[in-house]
Image (cartoon, rainbow, N blue to C red):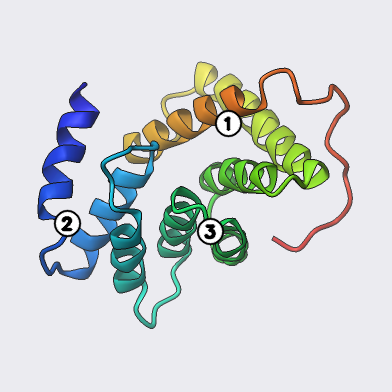
Amino acid sequence: EGYQRICKHLSAVADKPHERYVAYTIARTLCISPGDDVDVERMIELAAHYLGNDKSPWGLHVLGLAYYRAGQFDKAIESLELSNDGYLHEVAKVQNWLVLALSYKQLDDEDEAQYWMKRARRAIEEANEQDAKETAFISPSDWIPLHVLHREAEASFGDDLDTQEPREEQRDE
């Protein structure tokens, strides 16, 4: 309920001009979870505004997430793969992997969907083990979207995820 209240407020101000970081924050916050009252085309504009000429990995992540919410799965995949090419800690890349899994699933590419979902699941399990041993290693601004996206992906895959380990072929990420 609190998240929905924040989204309602941000949606009301989303059509106003914003400085780059505010545009990024609005787009990221509104795209974390699916919402019927979110203008996804405006979220794409805000994410693109944040990126400008600077193709930062986080900006590309938000653009990919906005494309995913808009049902533009090929563009989402392209942005998320570019984001993975940038400097991101592996835990941060897991958010991309979850959205890649969801995007490929929407495109009925089960092999790629399974690959990314299994990779994300394994990384989350390892991170949870590490977190149990140490103090928090991920910021709350990343922890929350990671777990919201993870929950959405798990619900989307349900029992469709095969039990084999993800393939270990080399990939450029």
Classify mark 1: residues with Cα within 10 Å, few (<14), some (14-19) or many (20+).
many
The residue singled out by tag 2 in the image is 14
**Residue in the foreground of this view, choosing between 173 and 48:** 48
Q: Are marks 2 and 3 in contact (CB under 8 Å)?
A: no
The image shows residue 76 at horizontal and vertical percentages of 55, 59
The image shows residue 157 at horizontal and vertical percentages of 67, 27
**Horizontal side, residue 66 vs residue 2: left or right:** right
Classify mark 3: residues with Cα within 10 Å, few (<14), some (14-19) or many (20+).
some
Q: Between marks 2 and 1, how big is the CA–CA gap?
A: 27 Å
Sequence-first tag of 3 and 1: 3
| Label 2: element kind | loop
Q: Between marks 3 and 1, how big is the CA–CA gap?
A: 17 Å
Query: Residue at point 51% right, 23% down?
Result: 131
Mark nearer the viewer, 2 or 3? 3
Name the image quarter holding the N terminus.
Answer: top left
Sequence-first tag of 2 and 3: 2
Name the image quarter holding the C terminus.
Answer: bottom right
Q: Which mark is residue 72?
A: 3
Q: Residue 2 carries which label?
A: none
Query: Residue at point 47% right, 35% down?
Result: 146
The image shows residue 96 at horizontal and vertical percentages of 56, 49
Q: Between marks 2 and 3, how big is the CA–CA gap?
A: 20 Å
The image shows residue 35 at horizontal and vertical percentages of 33, 37
**Residue in the foreground of this view, choosing between 161 and 96:** 161
Query: Residue at point 51% right, 25% down?
Result: 151
Q: Which amino acid type is shown beneath numbered disc 1?
A: Ala
Mark nearer the viewer, 3 or 1? 3
Query: Residue at point 76% right, 24% down?
Result: 160
